[in-house]
Image: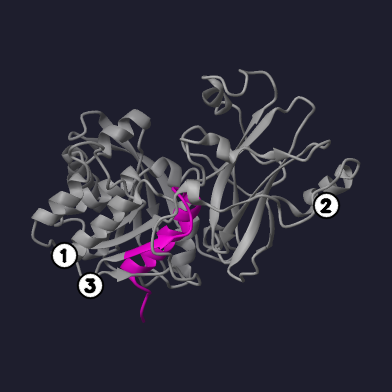
């Protein structure tokens, strides 16, 4: 029986996905909005505490909060749209339009959310310099007017195009403290390399290599983590800080991490869509390259391949294609719906037709990922029916979001590698 693992310190998961058009919108915030003439005092108070504003649940439930997003408009502001990660329906974008308090510059939009929610979000601001609202091109134009929240200091680097993206975390959400560098913790070493590859046909592939801090007594063979989308996990998010902290706390053993670059969007789609050559590159070129430089294990049970979205799909494909090298899959929000069309959920169908392999799965998905969740839950059922009794599956209160993936990654590493024992 597959283990459904609830995240630490969070309530039991709801029985089904929450579609974005079902997210409970509040007609009014759970606090008094300012009247004309009161806005300066209001904005001064808001600036001191930051946004979004989190209030007690208007229905009195201890495990929910009212969350209000705010924007300070100008005389030219015609509309403001707020899009928290996966809490907006692209088919009805008007549902995420903020309302303006008449006679003021205060725009607001409130939701009732469970107290372990977290997510990144963007504003899209119409300052009157584009098409008329309601015209055919309006929504596409508005999506080019992205802004971060100027009243929120919390931000993560954005995927691909850089720049920060604002985020919010409710009180019971897992925090990101494990990702912060801590004084007194021994630091590993990160270097970037061009790894030769014949299988991918592009000469070399950039890879970030994490080498753990090792004391005078250390393992003769180090576990290995292969984490896809390396250009975001290390240069942008600083994976090394997480690994340093987990190792220092004894939650995982010292390990080597290999983080291949996805290059660009087109290359990523080509490589991370169950491409056999990419699985071959990871198993037959990247791992031997690391073994020639460091004392890494060749035991698949101590080797993890990990990824998110298409990377999660590819992590599973690589392990199932080369179980002699990869014995553990850490897949977060994996695109197991792939490919969209008559051959949808191809990898799940392959698992259903194949005897169990010596591969362990650790899977997690966001409750707001309403497009991906049906395929995720079918994968869970197929794994159970095929004999993967040690697979773990869980759903977190969030979307398709690096804010969630960074803590899920830490939990998955601890679960798959286990705490250090003396």
Q: Which residues are magenta?
A: 393-422
Give coordinates of residue 52: x percent, y percent.
68, 51
Magenta residue check for 178: no
Q: Is residue 320 left or right of residue 243?
A: left
Q: Quote the CA–CA distance across marks 3 and 1.
A: 9 Å
Q: How many marks?
A: 3
Residue ID for mark 2: 45
Which quadrant: the C terminus?
bottom left
Give the spatial CA distance, label 2 vs label 1: 56 Å
Tell which circle, 2 or 1, labels the residue nearer the N-terminal end. 2
The answer to which of marks 3 and 1 sits earlier in the sequence is: 3
Where residue 201 sits: x, y (%)? Answer: 20, 29
Q: Is residue 191 left or right of residue 72?
A: left
Is there any visible trace of residue 304 in the rendered image? no
Identified at 66% across, 39% down, the residue is 98
Binning the other alpha carbons within 10 Å of mark 2 as few (below 14), some (14 to 19) or many (20 upward) gives few
In percent of width and height, residue 344 lies at 22, 42
Observer-side mark, 2 or 1, equals 1
Give yes or no for contact between labels 2 and 1 (Cβ–Cβ under 8 Å): no
Tag shown at residue 66: none
Neighbours of disc 1 within 10 Å: few (<14), some (14-19), many (20+): some
- Assign a secondary structure to mark 3: loop
Specify how the rendered protein is coloured: one colour
Q: CA distance from mark 3 to mark 2?
A: 52 Å
Asked which secondary structure carries label 1, the reply is helix
Q: Which residue is mark 1?
A: 385
Q: Earlier in the sequence, mark 3 or mark 2?
A: 3
Label 3 with label 1: CB-CB less than 8 Å: no
Residue at which label 3 appears? 1
User: Which of the 4 image quadrants contains residue 114?
Assistant: bottom right
Note whether 261 is above or below 2 in the view shown.
above
């Amino acid at each position: 029986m597959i283990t459904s693992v609830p995240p630490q310190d969070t309530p039991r998961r709801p029985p089904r996905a929450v579609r974005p058009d079902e997210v409970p919108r509040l007609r009014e915030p759970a606090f008094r909005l300012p009247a004309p003439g009161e806005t300066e005092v209001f904005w001064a108070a808001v600036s001191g505490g930051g946004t979004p504003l989190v209030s007690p649940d208007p229905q009195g439930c201890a495990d929910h909060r009212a969350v209000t997003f705010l924007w300070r408009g100008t005389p030219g502001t015609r509309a403001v749209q707020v899009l928290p990660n996966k809490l907006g329906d692209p088919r009805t974008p008007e549902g995420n339009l903020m309302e303006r308090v008449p006679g003021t510059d205060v725009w607001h939009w409130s939701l009732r959310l469970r107290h372990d929610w977290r997510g990144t979000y963007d504003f899209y601001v119409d300052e009157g310099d584009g098409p008329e609202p309601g015209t055919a091109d309006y929504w596409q134009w508005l999506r080019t007017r992205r802004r971060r929240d100027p009243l929120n200091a919390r931000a993560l680097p954005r995927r691909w195009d850089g720049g920060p993206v604002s985020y919010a975390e409710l009180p019971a959400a897992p925090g990101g403290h494990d990702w912060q560098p801590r004084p007194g913790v021994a630091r590993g070493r990160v270097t970037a390399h061009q790894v030769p590859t014949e299988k991918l046909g592009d000469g070399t592939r950039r890879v970030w290599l994490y080498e753990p801090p090792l004391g005078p007594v250390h393992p003769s063979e180090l576990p290995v983590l292969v984490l896809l989308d390396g250009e975001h996990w290390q240069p942008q998010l600083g994976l090394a800080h997480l690994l340093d902290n987990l190792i220092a706390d004894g939650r995982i053993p010292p390990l080597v991490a290999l983080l291949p670059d996805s290059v660009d969007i087109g290359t990523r789609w080509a490589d991370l869509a169950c491409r056999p050559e990419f699985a071959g590159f990871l198993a037959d070129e990247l791992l031997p390259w690391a073994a020639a430089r460091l004392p890494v294990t060749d035991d698949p049970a101590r080797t993890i391949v990990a990824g998110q979205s298409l990377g999660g799909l590819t992590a599973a494909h690589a392990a199932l294609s080369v179980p002699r090298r990869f014995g553990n899959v850490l897949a977060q929000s994996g695109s197991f719906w792939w490919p969209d069309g008559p051959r949808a959920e191809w990898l799940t169908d392959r698992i259903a037709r194949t005897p169990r392999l010596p591969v362990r799965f650790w899977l997690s998905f966001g409750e707001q990922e309403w497009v991906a969740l049906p395929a995720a839950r079918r994968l869970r059922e197929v794994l159970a029916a095929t004999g993967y009794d040690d697979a773990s599956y869980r759903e977190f209160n969030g979307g398709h979001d690096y804010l969630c993936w960074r803590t899920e990654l830490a939990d998955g590493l601890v679960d798959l590698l286990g705490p250090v024992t003396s």
